[in-house]
Amino acid sequence: MKILLLEDDLNYQESVSEYLSELGYEVECASDGETACDMIQNGYYHLFILDIKVPKINGFEVLKFIKNIGLQTPIMLMTSLVDIDDLAVGYELGCNEYLKKPFELAELKFRVAELMRKYYNLGDKNIILLNGGFEFDTANKLLKQNSQIIDLSAKELAVVEMLVLNLGRFVSMAELKEKIWDNKDINEADIRMHMLKIRQKTQNDFIISKRNFGYKIDAKEL
């Protein structure tokens, strides 16, 4: 499967392209929007990953170009822009996924795999094996153990998904407040209560906590 990556930050470009190549994807890179449009016009790709703030022609204009020439190829926007208006513009123009910088490469992996599965009916690559015999289905957003679905509330599921996307890394209270509760008024005791409820539905060591560091879920040991 072939991916076009539009990214003018050479460090990001190199790390992302190398990572995706290691996963078995064929990756071609462009450092400005004009070059990307030329490559799109003259080539074929299964996925476009576009940074927005790039030289010559920005990512939004490249997205418009893709749509104007009639391509139905899935598009992921990858940017440090955080304004909700920018996000809205991207979706209104027809992007299929939005990835905010900075991000973990594991998160990129899962989002790319899901787009490929959804649009090209690839094999099931979205099952993440976790400690304790649990598994998380990133496509359907389900937590299972021994094929049985764990009944989680929407917020509990969002917490598990965020921890899964950061496997093995402690996620701080501040990060949870920002990503899950949009920095709304929620105290740490309420977050701890959500963790307790998830543990009650799974097992005590499913979510690991460390004072001043936060919470994490570990991948299944091989």
Image (tube, rainbow, N blue to C red):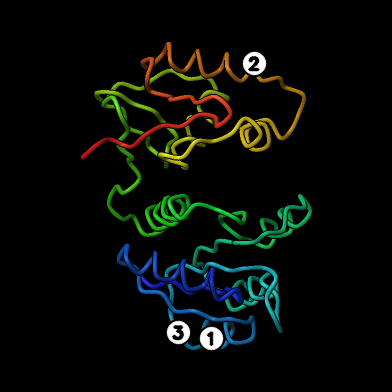
Residue 123 sits above or below residue 222 on the image: below
Q: Which mark is residue 41?
A: 1
Residue 199 sits above or below residue 63 on the image: above
Q: Residue at x 67, y 68 (%)?
A: 52
Which residue in the structure is indicated by mark 3? 43
Quadrant in the rendering for residue 100? bottom right
The crowd level at tag 3 (other Cα within 10 Å; few <14, some 14-19, many 20+) is: few
Front residue of 82/221: it is: 221
Residue placed furthest toward the front = 212
Amino acid carrying mark 2 in the image? Asp
Which residue in the structure is indicated by mark 2? 190
Tell me which numbered mark, 3 or 2, is placed earlier along the sequence: 3
Gap in angstroms between the C-alphas marked 1 and 3 = 6 Å
Residue placed furthest toward the left = 222
Q: Residue at x 74, y 59 (%)?
A: 89
Please say if the residues under marks 1 and 3 sit with CB atoms less than 8 Å apart. Answer: yes
The crowd level at tag 2 (other Cα within 10 Å; few <14, some 14-19, many 20+) is: few
Rendering coords of residue 168 (x, y %): 41, 39
The secondary structure type at the circle numbered 3 is loop
Rendering coords of residue 17 (x, y %): 43, 71
User: Looking at the rendering, in which quadrant would you find the N terminus?
Assistant: bottom left
Tell me which numbered mark, 1 or 2, is placed earlier along the sequence: 1
The crowd level at tag 1 (other Cα within 10 Å; few <14, some 14-19, many 20+) is: few
Front residue of 167/25: it is: 167
Amino acid carrying mark 1 in the image? Gln
